[in-house]
Amino acid sequence: MSDTKTSPQPADAAEGPDTAEGPDAGRLDDAERLSSAPEENDAAPVGIGVLGWLRWFWRQLTSMRVALLLLFLLSLAAIPGSLVPQNTNAFKVAEWKNAHKGITPLYEKLQLFDVYSSVWFSAIYILLFVSLAGCILPRTWQFVGVLRAQPPAAPRNLTRMPVYAAWHTGAAPEQVEAAAHRLLKKRRFRVAAGPGPVAAEKGYLREVGNLLFHFALFALLTGFAWASLDSGSGTKIVLEGQGYSNTTTQLDDFTGSRFYGVDDLDAFGFKLDGFTADFQTSGPAAGTAKEFVANVRYWEGSDSGRQKNARIEVNHPLEVGGSKVFLTAHGFAPVVTVRNAQNEVVYRGPTVFLPRDSNVTSFGAIKVNDYGTGPDGQKTQMAFQGFFLPTAASDFTHTGPISVFPAAANPQLVISAYVGDLRTDSGLPQNVYELDDKALTQLQVDGKPAAVKLKVGEGWDLPDGYGSITFDGYQQWANFTVSHRPGNAIALLGAVAAILGLIGSLFVQRRRIWVRAVAAPDGRTLVEVAGLGRSDSARTAEELAELAVELQDDAPATDAPATDAPPGPDAPATDAPAAADSPAAAVPTAPETKE
């Protein structure tokens, strides 16, 4: 983005006489040439027609000020996406709409449930793209031109530079210039070829850093755009010993994008052989997870015969094709056996319960659709709802059913029973982890809701002769997120490159140094060394001082001859720092800035 110029900097001086604006006017113009950024003109065009207005609007759009404004607007526009549920989670959106029916129509018109695909968010995003592209291309072309050009020739009057040193020496001018040329090359300056005053320039990495930052930001936005247009993700809870095939019929939920749908899923599958969770057992961090590991066997394509072993850990996903499988959660599934009034087994197996806290206090529902007939001979259905506690508290009279540790040290099942209609044939979607109790009746004992706390191996004879339920044990489950996001690598590289670009643009200084050696009337050689930086910095003065000290090895300072002859026409101007005849006096230790 183009650098907005608020005040001119001291510069490398201009050829030619001083102007009416003052003796430093030429230097101010040259200071601007130390930057390769295109110039900005904020003045609106007057009387130049439609084409002129279009050019003016284009200059404004590609300016740094507008680009920063667009970045700020983009950050503001992303806030609603983190506060309002998005359509990627249809269940949460439905819950929010039911709880806020009055304001829901307004939110829908403003596209607040689909922020990142909304018209207004896309408009800001596209304008930022255009602004960056319109800045990068001309700035790169201009920088290439700067690289191909020779460092600018020495100004006529070096005494007006911010940093300046001079001394007399007995060495010939050609010898001094050759030594200066060699020393500047040794310091990795780009030195102009040819005889005469030596001109050198250094610090091009500053502008390279600026351009790298702009390109990186463009790549970052490109990566995000690619990921939003060609990505998808889904989740799946897999019990130990069970498998998964990457198809939409097996995913618990799936969110696609414009160019990535259910037909684009990578063909692979895996089987969860075992899940290991290890927790801190003592100290202030008791209960903190130390290890989550899912041991799987996976296969690519449709050939499940060729399987490979793998470990999936937190932040260490399994990569298969263009997809990554992340381990995102774990929990327990109590295993129960349910018998009806006729003592027939109507349900047996594990049922996934979802954790509600860090100690994996888990809530869930067991639904028995094919229960058969109840004690009254009428066809009915049965359900159980309650908590699985991996490490049940010794007493939860006042707190309710809770677990005090995430590992299964004292597993218990706390449930209550319901009979009636589960409404599974109503055609309405249901949450498999909760009960729709509108058509259910809770079983009671002595007029109070019937509930029981079971340990592994214990059973409960249901009230009113509705059968029994036995808590046989539990299984662990792991939740996996299958993600396909092709733009993540580009976005990551863009972020790293942007940091490197900022480091270069902030810590590298663009600077120029000139060395002039001319024969004086007294037979000696006057050596002048001057420096100019893009910004005020002691580094330029230090570098010039070091160069002057090294240069005096080849062009040592000499004492002035005893003569009353007036100074020659090439001597420094009287308003400049006097050229010293000793190295200590000749070399400045700090920049001398003239306003």
Image (cartoon, rainbow, N blue to C red):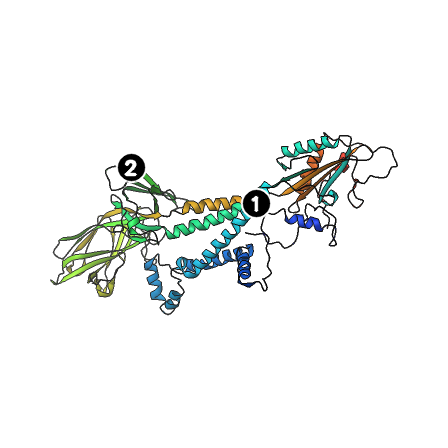
The residue nearer to you, when weighing 245 against 24, is 24
Report the front residue among 508 and 131.
131
Task: Using the rendered image of the protein, determine whether residue 147 is visible from the camera's viewpoint.
Answer: yes
Q: Earlier in the sequence, mark 1 or mark 2?
A: 1
Identified by mark 1, the residue type is Phe
* Residue located 36% across and 53% down the image: 357
Instruction: Provide the residue designation for mark 2.
Output: 308
Query: How dense is the environment of label 2, judged by Cα within 10 Å: few (below 14), some, or many (20 and up)?
Result: few
Q: Which residue is mark 1?
A: 143
Badge 2 element: strand
Could you say which is closer to the camera, residue 131 or residue 235?
131
Q: Secondary structure at mark 1?
A: helix
Q: CA distance from mark 1 to mark 2?
A: 52 Å
Residue type highlighted by circle 2: Lys
- Answer with the quarter of the image where residue 313 lies: top left
> Which mark, by number, is residue 172?
none
Percent x, y of residue 285:
42, 46
Location of residue 134 in the rendering, given as x and y in whole percent from the top left corner: 51, 52
Q: Quadrant of residue 53?
A: bottom right
Q: Is residue 485 left or right of residue 15?
A: left
Question: Looking at the picture, does residue 10 appear above or below residue 111?
Answer: above
Taking 314 as reference, is 37 left or right?
right
Q: Are marks 1 and 2 in contact (CB under 8 Å)?
A: no
